[in-house]
Image (tube, rainbow, N blue to C red):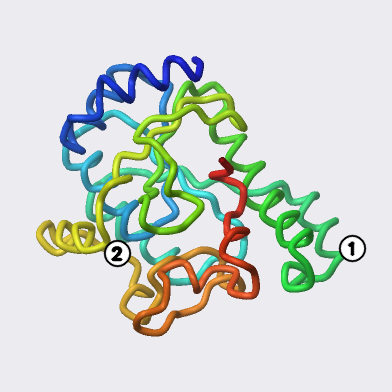
Amino acid sequence: MSKEKASELNTRFHELSTEGFLEKLSVEFPGKIRFATSLGAEDQVITHMLASGGIPIEIFTLDTGRMFSESYDLIEKIQSRYGIDIKIVFPDTVEVEKMVNEKGINLFYHSIENRKQCCGIRKIKPLQKALQGMNAWITGLRREQSPTRTDMQLIEWDAGNQLIKANPLLNWTEGEVWDYIQKHKIPYNTLHDKGFPSIGCQPCTRAVLPGEDIRSGRWWWENPETKECGLHKQ
């Protein structure tokens, strides 16, 4: 895999429907592509397309150990609705224990360095483990979600993980996501009904007020330009 391959696929796949896009990816990377769901609304759209379309792409999620109970409830709803298993990937217990005992249970509030260390142990390393042996992975990122995502492509080269990265909902609007969810009666995280447009770890996510940026509830004590955990570093 290479940056050139990503560019070639981006040109070849960019006019496909989202469902067709996912089907083509499964054919292009048989058994070598996985979908990382963070259990947000966008990811539920992709999960529905994969499950209802019988598209053979494995779905996994990262359990950081600091998730909302509503997120765990959603995993059960997904598995019951679609009859599929979502692979749960956990961080290394020894690394988490060492970090917490050295820097405190809520170390992420004290500095960006601490927060990135926590994300690294709880999210980035588990993601790397989940992607071992893969040639590509899929995300639910949308361009309008964040200023850090405006330059992303439908298919791009993930230099950090040395993989092809596909973003099938990149050009979808928030309204299109929710219209699709309502049309297909897709189960979603009930936190969305409580003012949470973006859902991550419980200590690092809060509800937002009407009119606030949809990412303002994530790491709200930081500047917008730093609001990525490192999973989608450009």
Q: Amino acid at mark 2?
A: Tyr
Q: Is residue 52 left or right of residue 100?
A: left
- Up the image or down, 5 lies above or below 108; here it is above
Image coordinates for residue 97, horizontal then vertical, percent: 80, 58
Viewer-side residue, 193 vs 70: 193
Q: Which mark is residue 102?
A: 1
Residue placed farthest to the bottom in the image? 209
Say what secondary structure mark 1 lies in.
helix
Residue drawn at x 12%, y 57% is 184
Q: Picture quarter containing residue 193?
A: bottom left
Residue drawn at x 64%, y 69% is 222
Residue placed farthest to the right in the image? 102
Image coordinates for residue 4, horizontal then vertical, percent: 45, 15
Question: Which residue is identified by label 2?
Answer: 188
Q: Amino acid at mark 1?
A: Glu
Q: How would you rate the neighbour count of disc 1 (Cα within 10 Å): few for under 14, some for 14-19, many for 20 or more?
A: few
Q: Is residue 133 left or right of residue 107?
A: left
Q: Quadrant of the C terminus?
A: top right
Q: Are marks 2 and 1 in contact (CB under 8 Å)?
A: no
Residue placed farthest to the left in the image? 183
Q: Which mark is residue 84?
A: none
- Up the image or down, 90 lies above or below 137; here it is below
Viewer-side residue, 183 vs 144: 144
Q: Picture quarter containing residue 203?
A: bottom right
- Up the image or down, 12 lies above or below 185; here it is above
Q: Is residue 98 left or right of residue 223?
A: right
Image coordinates for residue 133, horizontal then vertical, percent: 54, 21
Residue drawn at x 39%, y 21% is 7
- Sequence-first disc among 2 and 1: 1
Q: How would you rate the neighbour count of disc 2 (Cα within 10 Å): few for under 14, some for 14-19, many for 20 or more?
A: many
| Marks 2 and 1, how far apart at CA | 36 Å
Viewer-side residue, 171 vs 91: 171
